[in-house]
Image (cartoon, helix red, strand yellow):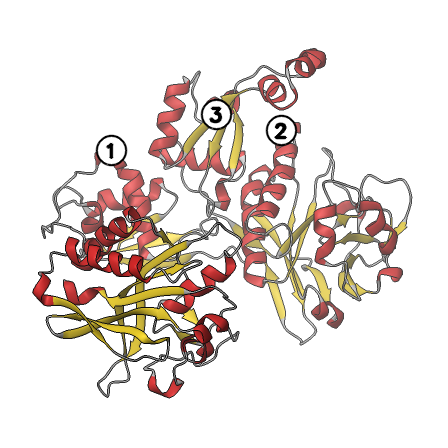
């Protein structure tokens, strides 16, 4: 899961505390559903990564200030930066109220982003926003860059779904154009470079850049590359690779223009909401974002960011039952108070229902159970009462599986090696290779097989074991293999359903047929199953899979439960085997 670094001094300042012990921070994180991963410092981190000598060489350039590394859930994008994490902890401790985010449209008119039809070939969506009168400090500037990196690594899926670009708006002139051009037609000075490059040259330049080369394949093979320009033709960025140097942001930047191009419009909107909500607190008018209009080729005009608040109505009984509290133990007012501490402002709409307002920072809330989880966190997992379930059930192993495990051990004790083969096979495996007509088999067929190797569900374990023998012919002889698994048959009734049957099969392959060993293994199995001598016997029969005159039915209480014999040379030849082999197969379920 993502890890957020926050200095101890910054955490104390946010929570109005003079000092924190490491144990108190650990406890606070646990109460909020997070985990304190590590307590460290800049010097300790460098020493851990590059050695003590390197850390000593850096001297006073490294800080010894305590840094807390806090692990946050992968779906809580609002906690991926110091600003979001500290604000959430402040609200959790009732030191602040949940902020009200709003997107405003300036009286002079919104900035415009026009999307060209050519972008449909590569990254068809773009969302934009403006942060006005922003005041950066070195710490907040670093956090702003870090949040973009964390979003790129998580929800943006290494920029393949969404790529973020941030620009100094005062160096640009609107309206803006998002289009896709041939690589040779894109020429600009990229970030941290001293001269202009074409897109083709940039691909070569960054192929050796460890930070950027991972993103090149996203657009490299496309006939067109995406590019964003202002009204004067100045290139803002070539997403998802690099921004232009002309509009780079600095500590002195006051107005930040944010654009995010994407292949997934919803994720782009989530990313934009997360970014502007986290850093709008540094605007002169806190938690206020200037909207931008995006005009698509089909005439559709969308305004971003949406910063939409959602209402979720939840039954009080559902919440009480979920945390194991009665009416008197958890009142509606207490439910509303605890949910508000989790930045989910809640109000009672009746004696049985609460209405929860989900802010634009909480895109992880998809279902009432997500609200229930936050309620449990606000109450405290350690404060939830442990109780036995109303129905008492004693678990135990299924009889068939218990018998299977015991048989598996006994056959292994007899010197046989277990193999595990596919439950699906080809029609040829269960018919032609075993010298059986396919029409006579109650095989369950796959309606749309993707490969000839997986056309039907196996009706016998023999094909899989013989394929395993074929793949291991180079091993010392003899090969003694067994398998105890399910086979599948068509149901004998007219329902068209299928039934599973547990079988045990064993094969002896060597310079002699080894029939006496297979027969001895069968006798041993019947002995451990406790079958009386008079209820088990072999009855001669003829089956095409086996050698003529060397095949028998295994009878239990007078009924056939399996077959045993020396495999026919033609059967062995179908699996490219040249030495004799003996085998048996029988139904385990008959002995339950």
**Horizontally, is 534 left or right of 294 in the view?**
left
Q: Residue 38 carries which label?
A: 3
Left or right for 434, reference 175: left
Q: How crowded is mark 3: few (under 14 residues within 10 Å), some or many (20 or more)?
A: some
Q: Please give left or right for residue 210 compared with residue 63 in the image.
A: right
Q: Is residue 557 above or below residue 230?
A: below
First reached walking from the N terminus: tag 3 or tag 2: 3
The answer to which quarter of the image holds residue 568 is: bottom left
Q: Is residue 93 visible?
A: no
Q: How far apart are marks 1 and 2 (CA)?
A: 35 Å
Q: Tell me, yes or no, whether the two marked residues, 1 and 2, touch with CB atoms within 8 Å.
A: no
C-alpha separation, residue under disc 1 versus residue under disc 3: 22 Å
Indicate which disc, 1 or 3, sits on the residue closer to the N terminus. 3
Q: Mark 2 points at which residue?
A: 139
Local SS, label 1: helix
Label 2 sits on a secondary structure element that is: helix
């Amino acid at each position: 899961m993502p890890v957020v670094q926050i200095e101890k001094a910054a955490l104390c300042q946010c929570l109005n505390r003079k000092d924190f012990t490491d144990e108190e921070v650990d406890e606070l994180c646990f109460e909020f559903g997070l985990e304190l991963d590590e307590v460290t410092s800049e010097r300790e981190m460098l020493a851990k990564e590059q050695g003590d000598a390197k850390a000593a060489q850096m001297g006073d350039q490294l800080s010894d200030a305590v840094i807390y590394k806090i692990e946050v859930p992968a779906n809580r994008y609002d906690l991926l930066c110091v600003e979001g994490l500290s604000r959430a902890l402040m609200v959790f401790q009732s030191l602040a109220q949940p902020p009200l985010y709003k997107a405003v449209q300036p009286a002079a008119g919104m900035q415009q982003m026009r999307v060209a039809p050519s972008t449909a070939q590569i990254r068809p969506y773009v969302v934009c926003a403006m942060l006005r009168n922003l005041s950066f400090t070195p710490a907040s500037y670093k956090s702003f860059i870090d949040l973009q990196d964390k979003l790129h690594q998580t929800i943006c899926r290494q920029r393949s779904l969404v790529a973020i670009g941030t620009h100094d708006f005062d160096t640009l002139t609107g309206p803006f154009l998002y289009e896709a051009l041939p690589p040779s037609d894109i020429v600009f000075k990229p970030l941290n470079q001293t001269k202009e490059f074409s897109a083709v040259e940039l691909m070569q330049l960054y192929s050796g850049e460890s930070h950027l080369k991972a993103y090149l394949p996203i657009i490299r093979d496309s006939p067109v590359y995406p590019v964003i320009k202002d009204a004067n033709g100045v290139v803002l960025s070539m997403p998802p690779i690099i921004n232009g140097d002309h509009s780079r942001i600095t500590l002195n930047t006051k107005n930040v223009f944010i654009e995010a191009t994407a292949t997934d419009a919803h994720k782009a909107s989530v990313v934009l909401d997360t970014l502007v909500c986290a850093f709008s607190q540094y605007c002169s008018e806190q938690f206020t974002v200037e909207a931008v209009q995006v005009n698509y080729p089909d005439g559709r005009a969308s305004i971003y960011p949406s910063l939409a608040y959602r209402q979720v109505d939840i039954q009080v009984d559902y919440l009480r039952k979920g945390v194991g509290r009665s009416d008197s133990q958890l009142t509606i007012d207490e439910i509303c108070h605890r949910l508000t501490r989790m930045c989910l402002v809640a109000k009672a709409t009746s004696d049985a229902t609460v209405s929860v307002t989900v802010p634009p920072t909480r895109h992880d809330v998809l279902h009432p159970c997500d609200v229930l989880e936050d309620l449990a966190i606000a109450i405290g997992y350690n404060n939830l009462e442990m109780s036995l379930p109303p129905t008492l059930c004693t678990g135990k192993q299924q009889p068939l599986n218990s018998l299977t495990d015991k048989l598996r051990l006994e056959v292994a004790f007899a010197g046989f090696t277990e193999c595990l083969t596919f439950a699906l096979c080809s029609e040829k495996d269960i018919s032609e290779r075993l010298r059986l007509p396919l029409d006579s088999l109650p095989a369950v067929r796959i309606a749309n097989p993707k490969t000839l190797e997986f056309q039907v569900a196996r009706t016998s374990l023999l094909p899989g074991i013989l394929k395993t023998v074929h793949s291991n012919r180079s091993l010392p002889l003899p090969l003694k293999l067994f398998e105890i698994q399910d086979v599948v048959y068509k149901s004998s009734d007219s329902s068209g359903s299928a039934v599973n049957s547990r079988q045990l099969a064993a094969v002896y392959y060597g310079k002699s047929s080894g029939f006496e060993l297979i027969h001895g293994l069968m006798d041993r199995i019947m002995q451990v199953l406790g079958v009386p001598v008079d209820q088990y016997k072999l009855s001669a029969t003829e089956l095409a899979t086996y050698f003529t005159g060397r095949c028998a039915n295994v009878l239990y209480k007078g009924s056939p439960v399996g077959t045993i014999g020396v495999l026919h040379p033609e059967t062995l030849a179908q699996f490219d085997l040249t030495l004799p082999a003996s085998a048996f197969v029988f139904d385990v379920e008959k002995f339950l």
